[in-house]
Amino acid sequence: MIFGAIYFAAVFLSLGVGSFFLIKKAGLGDPLRVVNKFLIYYWVFDLAFRYILQKMPVINIKPLLYLPIVKNKVVHYSLGKTMASFFNWTHAFFFVPFSIVLLFQGYDVLGVIGWHIAIIALIYSNNFINILVNNKDAVFYPVLGLLVVLGICQYYQIFDITVYTAPLFDALYDLPWTAVITWLLLAALYISAFKYFKKNMYLDAGLATKQTEAKTEDFTWLNRFGNLGLFLKNDIKLIKRNKRSKTTVIMSFFFIFYGLLFFTGMLEVYDNPFMKIFAGIFVSGGFLFSFGQFVPSWDSSYYPLMMSQNIRYKEYLDSKWYLIVIATLISTVLAAFYLVWGWEAYAAVVVGAIYNVGVNSYLVLWGGAYIKTPIDLTSNKKAFGDKQAFNAKTLLLTLPKLLLPIVFYAIGHFLINPIAGYSFVVLAGILGFVFKNPVFRKIEGIYKKEKYKTLLAYKQKA
């Protein structure tokens, strides 16, 4: 988590300092107007990112109800904790240096100040919007889908929403007093969140048992595959029903867009064939890396029960492998839009997918034997990473996942041509697929060797 925070802070800081000059150099127009044009996407994406990862305020109110503390103070304290969230102050690493650059470049002082404090209010507005709509999937997913559709429409010049939103953000600079409107919005959202929490601050609300209609999901079509189908059914249900697993799937979906940094020429340092192979691995392998590396931790709550049954490790690992392969294939198909940037871009994704299926799928399952961190499926705690997942063995297994395909490509690229480089990576993936059975026997032996250490670890508190 610390490394993740440092990484995002560094990225935001570099963009905050350099965006003005990069936009100017590219001849896109007034840098402030260009940023304002796309602020609507920034704002909505920030809200979506919060919905997935930001923790909601939680306070044990039972002991407080016996103390002479008014409810208002407790609610204000709870909401105040969210104000200091990483998801709020990290934006300062972009907007503060960008605003300073604007001032040094001769922009109107009052205009820049008005624009800046208005953006602060909008960022904090997201904080309270997220609190109000948290766990309301019926609201979140349609909004996210609408954002994606609008982005596609703008790219293909069908409909450009920024034509209507950019003037609103421009007004924050042209008319600094309009920043008051954003702060009134923030105040209204805070009051709404305050009233919502105060209204529900009694024991009956927290202890009441929710009654929902039970739904059966048999997935009977998987029965034809025997024990393999049984494990696959359990994994599908696990993903559909639990907050942590659903968050992981959503995060893996966003990996598909990681290639935009590499294939579009957005960043010059990434514009080379070696980095494109690197991108192809991540674009097609989002689920593989985010879900696969925590096998068998996903089953930690009932892993001791599984190990007391007549279950073969090979069948268990097979089900996880097939799930990873299916997700990799789906990601590869969804990434077909990279054909817009040429066949080489999509070829890198397809080649990365073949390598992921033939090599990396085994490596993540192998590494999972050494990650003994129990997972709480009902919580997003540590959804973005876990320091216990890093050790010498998992680190060594990470190297062939990312560096080997680049090495294979480099050999073919320099000895023959770029197509040969792609062919070498594909060949490595195909060979891995051919030797699946002996590789699985090796992995099965490792899981058996680590079995009792894993069982002991899962008895510990997550």
Image (cartoon, rainbow, N blue to C red):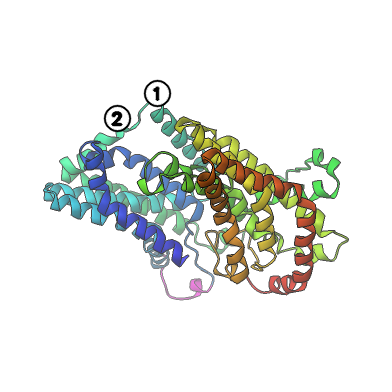
Q: Earlier in the sequence, mark 1 or mark 2?
A: 1
* Left or right of residue 261: residue 334: right
Point out the frontmost of discs 1 and 2: 1
Q: Dot 1 corresponds to which residue? A: 158
Q: In the structure shown, which secondary structural element does the residue marked by tag 2 occupy?
A: helix
At label 2, counting other C-alpha atoms closer than 10 Å, the crowd grade (few under 14, some 14-19, many 20 or more) is: few
Q: Dot 2 corresponds to which residue? A: 163
Residue 408 at x, y = what percent?
Answer: 58, 50
> Residue shown at 60%/58% (left/top)?
400
* Left or right of residue 387: residue 122: left
At label 1, counting other C-alpha atoms closer than 10 Å, the crowd grade (few under 14, some 14-19, many 20 or more) is: few
Indicate which disc residue 183 carries: none
Residue at the front extreme of this rendering: 415
Q: Nearer the viewer, residue 121 or 277?
A: 277
Q: Which residues are magenta?
A: 63-71
Q: Is residue 180 visible?
A: no
Q: Amino acid at mark 2?
A: Val
